[in-house]
């Protein structure tokens, strides 16, 4: 059936509005990128730089030459890698166990998981627990409290429930144990879901901020988001952490704004780089548990 001209006009209007809105959301990030690559002298002498006449990598060279920011990037990278691996193992293993009909404790554990969705102990009990466990000023204080989510466990459990029982029975007839079935059959089958959840976990660990403010006092374990926050505060107040102040007091007389923008670009780049490789799995993974019946 040929669509009515009014319907086609309405669709064209909707597409135009959505494209314009999408491009508008890119403007702030494009401005951050432009400022980060602008020549420091031109930025200091020009009120508003839209398209710089002279491009420069001076701010990036300066940031990477300091000890503070590269170290915080390494901390965030280690946090994302270790945390994502631990979270995937726990979430997929727990979800697989809860999806098995022969697992006797699944109702009790599911009630415990649902309990955490309804009742949150709060910030103070969480801090006291982390402190009593001796995790203050360690990377584990940023990983263990957020190791998994009740929502993610339920979604993964729904995915495993959709896998036919005959697949597991065939593997056991061939001699696989329960652990063998999980690692050799279920994990390869759930690759799309694992890729989607790995992106969720990696982004969450990479953007860790609040827990780091609570549990990390040692500058050696500060993730990148905390250093960015200190950069923003100290560039306006000129007081704060000495290691971060060193970045703003450049011998090369670089404007603090270009240094901040370069830090933001460097902090965003790894996630932007990883996302296209996981996008094809991301769409499939988002459908996990969405189809009922």
Image: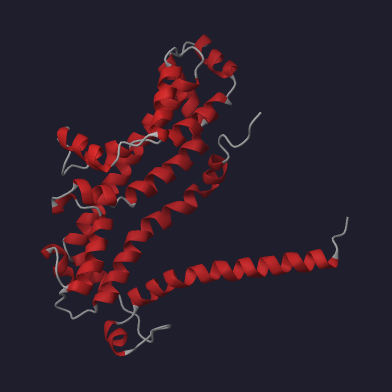
Q: What percent of the width, then of the height, locates residue 79?
A: 28, 45
Relative to 5, 27 lies left or right: left
* Quadrant of residue 71 within the rendered picture: bottom left
Judged from this view, the residue extending furthest toward the left is: 242
Closer to the camera in the image, 222 or 58:
222
Residue appearing at x 19%, y 69% in the figure: 234
Q: Is residue 206 above or below residue 10?
A: above
Q: What percent of the width, then of the height, locates residue 211?
A: 26, 47
On the rendered image, what quadrant is the C terminus found in? top right
Relative to 289, 151 lies left or right: left
**Tally of numbered discs:** 0
Closer to the camera in the image, 90 or 133:
133
Residue appearing at x 47%, y 10% in the figure: 175
* Quadrant of residue 62 within the rendered picture: bottom left
* Quadrant of residue 108 within the rendered picture: top left
On the rendered image, what quadrant is the N terminus found in? bottom right
Task: Tell me if residue 93 can be seen.
Answer: no
Closer to the camera in the image, 50 or 106:
106
Relative to 283, 147 lies left or right: left
Judged from this view, the residue extending furthest toward the bottom is: 45
Q: What percent of the width, then of the height, locates residue 17?
A: 64, 69
Residue appearing at x 20%, y 37% in the figure: 130
Q: What percent of the width, then of the height, locates residue 112?
A: 39, 25
């Amino acid at each position: 059936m040929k669509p009515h001209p009014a319907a086609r006009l309405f669709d064209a209007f909707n597409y135009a509005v959505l494209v314009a809105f999408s491009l508008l959301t890119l403007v702030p990030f494009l401005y951050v990128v432009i400022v980060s690559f602008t020549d420091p002298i031109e930025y200091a002498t020009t009120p508003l730089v839209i398209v710089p006449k002279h491009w420069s990598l001076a701010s990036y060279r300066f940031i990477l030459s300091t000890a503070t920011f590269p170290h915080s990037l390494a901390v965030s990278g280690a946090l994302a890698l270790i945390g994502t691996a631990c979270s995937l193992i726990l979430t997929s293993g727990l979800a697989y166990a809860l999806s098995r009909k022969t697992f006797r404790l699944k109702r009790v554990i599911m009630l415990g998981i649902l309990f955490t969705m309804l009742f949150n102990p709060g910030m103070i009990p969480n801090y006291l627990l982390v402190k009593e466990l001796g995790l203050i000023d360690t990377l584990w204080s940023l990983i263990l409290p957020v190791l998994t989510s009740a929502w993610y466990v339920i979604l993964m459990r729904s995915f495993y429930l959709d896998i036919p029982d005959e697949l597991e029975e065939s593997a056991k007839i061939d001699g696989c144990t329960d652990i063998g079935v999980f690692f050799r059959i279920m994990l390869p089958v759930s690759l799309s879901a694992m890729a989607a959840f790995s992106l969720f976990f990696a982004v969450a660990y990479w953007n860790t901020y609040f827990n780091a403010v609570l549990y990390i006092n040692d500058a050696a374990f500060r993730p990148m988001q905390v250093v960015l926050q200190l950069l923003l505060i100290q560039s306006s107040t000129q007081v704060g952490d000495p290691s971060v102040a060193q970045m703003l007091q450049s011998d090369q007389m670089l404007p603090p704004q270009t240094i901040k923008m370069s830090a933001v670009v460097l902090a965003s780049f790894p996630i932007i780089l990883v996302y296209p490789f996981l996008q094809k799995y991301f769409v499939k993974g988002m459908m996990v548990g969405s189809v009922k019946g």
